[in-house]
Amino acid sequence: MKTSENRLWFRSQMVEHEAALMRYAARITGDENRARDVVQETFLRLFRQEREAVEAHVLQWLFTVCRNRALDVLRKEGRMTTTDETGFAALQSPDPPPEAALENQETLERVFASLDRLPSRQQEVIRLKFQNGLSYKEISGITSHSVSYVGVLIHEGMKTLRASLGALIPEA
Amino acid sequence: MTDNNAQNDSKMPRPGEPVTHSEDPRLTAYALDELQHAEDRVAVESYLDSSSEGRAQTESTRALADVLSEKLATEDAPQLSPEQRASLASALEGQGARPGARRAVLRRWVTAAAALVLGVLFWRVLSGGGLVSEKPAAAPAPTVAVAEKREAGGLGTHARSAGRSVSGAVDGSQGSGGGGSRVDAPFDTYGSHEVVGVAGGAVNEITGPAASSPGPQKSLGYLSSPKSADSDALSLGERSVVPTGGESYATFTENPFQPLTQDRYSALSTFGIDVDTASYSIARRYLNRGNVPPPDAVRLEEFINAFDYALPEPTGEHPFSVSLDAATAPWSPRHRLVRIGLKGAAFEEEERPPCNLVFLLDVSGSMKAQDKLPLLIESLKMLVRELDATDRVALVTYASGSQLVLPPTSGADKTAILAALDGLSAAGSTHASDGIQQAYRLAEEHFVEGGVNRVLLATDGDFNVGLTEENELETFIAAKAASGVFLTVLGFGTGNLQDSKAEILADRGNGNYAYIDSLNEADKVLVREMGATLVTIAKDVKIQVEFNPEHVASYRLLGYENRALAAKDFRDDTKDAGEIGAGHTVTALYEIVPVNAPDLVGAVDLKYQVEASVEESVPNNPETLTVNLRYKLPDGEVGREFSVSFVDREQSFEEANSDFRFAAAVAAFGMALRQSDHRGESDLGAIYEWAASGKGTDPYGDRAEFLRLVRQAQGLGRY
């Protein structure tokens, strides 16, 4: 039984985090429809929690459940392999990119292209860090990598990105 | 549980181990402020001291981090289907209303649990590493998402009922609290009308319209010998704009302590009120994401005014009341803290003036993010549901060009308005269009005499609404404000926000600026405080405080830095200032150093200066200060004036009422986030205690949320 104030809070979580979770689930499952089911399931599980129990770390909670559900789906469909490079796939955007300002578009495309070339583990943690603002600790909680391993993955990924995006990084 | 990848162990240094090369991952962690062990900071910094390569890498990592954060935020995301959203919303509703639903869920859990056991086995087999986690799923759950009940209207319907039931619950709790008369209507924007009374024994009489003598300044009541005139009470710190990621916040210098000097006019402090609250929601957004808000995004007055305080309703000829109280400044026990509270007249639902609203919405590609257009649509739906047949709503969008999406439509025709909102989608770039002219033209064509005529501009930061020349937009908006159409700016999303620009536009447009970071905030700004947001009851409200040098050595206004006015501007009715909305409360805090403050406790008594030369020349006046107010009625051109005097009864902080303690805590929190030099003895622990002691009934949970934010900030370990 939730108070109406708490229900509003749960609804806000849906509005605020749907996009982030959809991106994440789609990356892992490689498929938008599967991602939709995963995210719906994630929110259903959230709704069964007490607000007090999850509020302090709700983003980490959502990503953890979302990740586990997404891997579950892959596993059920027998598409899971044990190599490092599966799962966090480059997702083809079904829509043509929005006609944003041209130079901006170029930057965007280069950032995404460089990111897509990273090993999937690096891609995953870099997206969690910079797209979703999660800390090393939270990422460690979500991915079950140790905090120091998260540090190594981000360090290596950033090194590659610095090299490939050099010109786009503003001079300090 | 952690995965152990032997090949990576060599790359993982032990805590405190010296950094010897640029491949050490702690360098990246340091640049991102993610070092896990204090001793690593020493190791990294000593390496950076000796390595220019390391320093360059650190800078470059930070710059790359900014680029990534900014660009990744704009990435397209697939969306849930409308059916899924509706089914989720009804699942959530079910948890509030129907106890029977629990049993059904439980039954499904049992079957699901069996499936889960199989699932875990399978999973183990496949998890040779890679992305697979050994963590058990957080909770047993049905394997199939089941919509128990579908309702037409999807999310929207539920947003409404959720929002409504919040006010319902509040009404109930306050009824039992007793004492307060309560207007039970959506337009009653503030919870309790219970008058707490102005504690501290304030001399709180309204002395009526001031003497009609013309002239730019109030005459000085406390000192009578004529001396030099004309001094600007406060000087505005120079303003420049600092980009933070893609966002920009104007830098400003905090008001310093102003001593009362030989210059008699140094006893005057003059500013225009500010009703904006965006700064608080922006800081909340940062803190909720575990980030430190940029100090310049923190404006104390917007923090303080983000909360509602119980103040007496205005009763006399003026549309707002003024209350004063004072107590020890908790962060600086020798100083006094004086609170000036303004409360605008509220109205009953049936008295609400008709609204003529034109929404001008940014639908450029950057608005695609979930916390932008989708949140905007949900937010406006909440507002639209409060409207009725006397109101008119029109929708204009701008992106590559501007488009009239919905001509002015009766508030009773909710289906049409909601459908138009639902049909919005973000695409295209923003560039010059005539969106703003079109919006104001519509508002003017359907102008309602005596009603609310307002353009609501919602954007994530692109103000390319049709006027591109420097200041052209500001001038246009100011001119339109003079004709009676006011502006509300609603900021959304991250990464692109032109905070200072939004604030300036809202000022020029006799309006307000709110930042919407969640449905809760939308509910607060657009539903609970709709009157305050939309209905202006007094405009160009200015405050000029005269301090009595008998009691006050120096003073400091907390916040309002960009609202400072020269003393002579007080009676200059061409000088713009802030507006008060219906039912709105506006609070200003002054920190005062009393003349008897024993700041020099350890020093000898002065031999050559005789004490109390001032007291000898002037009859003893117990008043600490007088607050002079000047304002115009919403359609008025000439300022009206009144004043309130105040005697400080030396109340301690503990004796102050809960609102006072809470407001002080909020100010102290703002100072902590700004790393202010004036924060004195406050730390986040103390601030938490002060706020907790002032939490009061907190009908909407706003103050509880503040307490959570203080904890969140403590967790960052920065303050």
Image (cartoon, coloured by chain):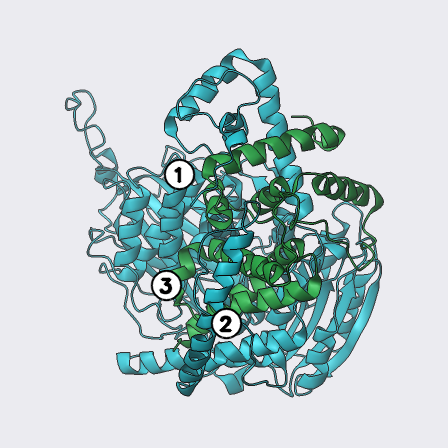
Q: Nearer the viewer, residue B613 or B254?
A: B254
Residue for badge 3: A52
Q: Quadrant of residue B316?
A: bottom left
Is B494 displayed left or right of B615 in the figure?
right
* Quarter of the picture holding the N terminus of chain A: bottom left
**Which chain is represented by cyan in the image?**
B
| Circle 1 or circle 2, nearest the eye | 2
Q: For label 1, count other residues whose C-alpha is less than 10 Å away and answer few (under 14), some (14-19) or many (20+).
A: many
Across and down, in percent, residue B602 comes to: 16, 25
The type of residue carrying mark 3 is: Glu
- Secondary structure found at label 2: loop
| Circle 3 or circle 2, nearest the eye | 3
Badge 1 sits on which subunit?
A: B
B449 above or below A71? Answer: below
Residue for badge 1: B264
Q: Nearer the viewer, residue B487 or B85?
A: B85
The type of residue carrying mark 2 is: Ala
Q: Tell me which residue sits at (69%, 49%) in the image.
A: A89
The type of residue carrying mark 1 is: Arg
Q: For label 3, count other residues whose C-alpha is less than 10 Å away and answer few (under 14), some (14-19) or many (20+).
A: few
**Is residue B151 shown to the viewer in this render?**
yes
- Secondary structure found at label 1: helix
Q: CA distance from mark 3 to mark 1?
A: 56 Å
Q: Nearer the viewer, residue B323 or A166?
A: A166
Q: Colour of chain A?
A: green
Residue for badge 2: B582
- Secondary structure found at label 3: helix
Q: CA distance from mark 3 to mark 2?
A: 34 Å
Q: For label 2, count other residues whose C-alpha is less than 10 Å away and answer few (under 14), some (14-19) or many (20+).
A: many
Is B341 displayed left or right of B461 in the figure?
left
Mark 1 or mark 2, which has the lower sequence index? 1
* Quarter of the picture holding the C terminus of chain A: top right
